[in-house]
Image (cartoon, rainbow, N blue to C red):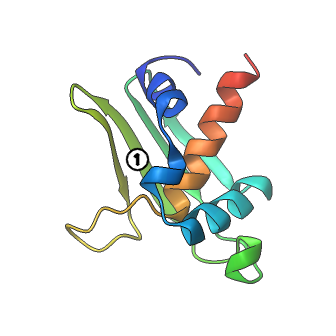
Amino acid sequence: MTGPVTDLIGQMDIGSMALPSNIRYGTAIYRRGAVEFIEETPLRVEAWAGGLDGSMGEGGGTRRRVELVATPDGLQWHCTGNPKNHQIFCKHCVAVALAIAATKTRQ
């Protein structure tokens, strides 16, 4: 996977975008292999993240649909788990971003 979304993911500092708890939980989701890409284009990535058994610390919780989009203003995101008009970079977004970054480093 290459293109503007992967470039933006490579440039971003997840630590400044997400709460420490979301980084920890999102990393657990990613490490347990619970990211499934639905659609990948250079400008847009859509994926399922989560849906695992266990505690939140182990990456457990509900499966959510995440969309990351490259725009002229930078990276935009949406997770179906976020309330309307409250677009935090949640654990599901973190997991998808880590999966994208891992895919890019393998190329």
The total number of labels drawn is 1
- Residue 45 sits above or below residue 57 on the image: above
Residue 63 in sight here: no
- Name the one closer to the observer, 96 or 9: 9
Residue in the image at 57% along x and 75% along y: 62
Please tell me which residue is depicted at 37% across the width and 25% down the height of the picture.
43
Residue 70, image quadrant? top left
In the rendered structure, the answer to whether residue 58 lies left or right of residue 82 reads right
Q: Which of 98 and 18 is in front in this view?
A: 18
Residue occupying image coordinates x 57% and y 47% = 96
* Relative depth, front residue between 107 and 15: 15
Quadrant (top left, top right, bottom left, bottom right) of the N terminus: top right
The residue that appears at 78% across and 54% down in the rendered structure is 31
Identify the amino acid type marked 1.
Glu
Q: Mark 1 points at which residue?
A: 67
Say left or right for 106 vs 39. right
In the image, is 36 to the left or to the right of 55?
left
Res 23 quadrant in image: bottom right
Q: Relative to residue 38, is residue 105 drawn left or right?
A: right
The percent coordinates of residue 22 (x first, y second) are 55, 67
| Residue furthest front as drawn | 16
Q: Is residue 57 above or below residue 69?
A: below
Quarter holding the C terminus? top right
* Badge 1 element: strand
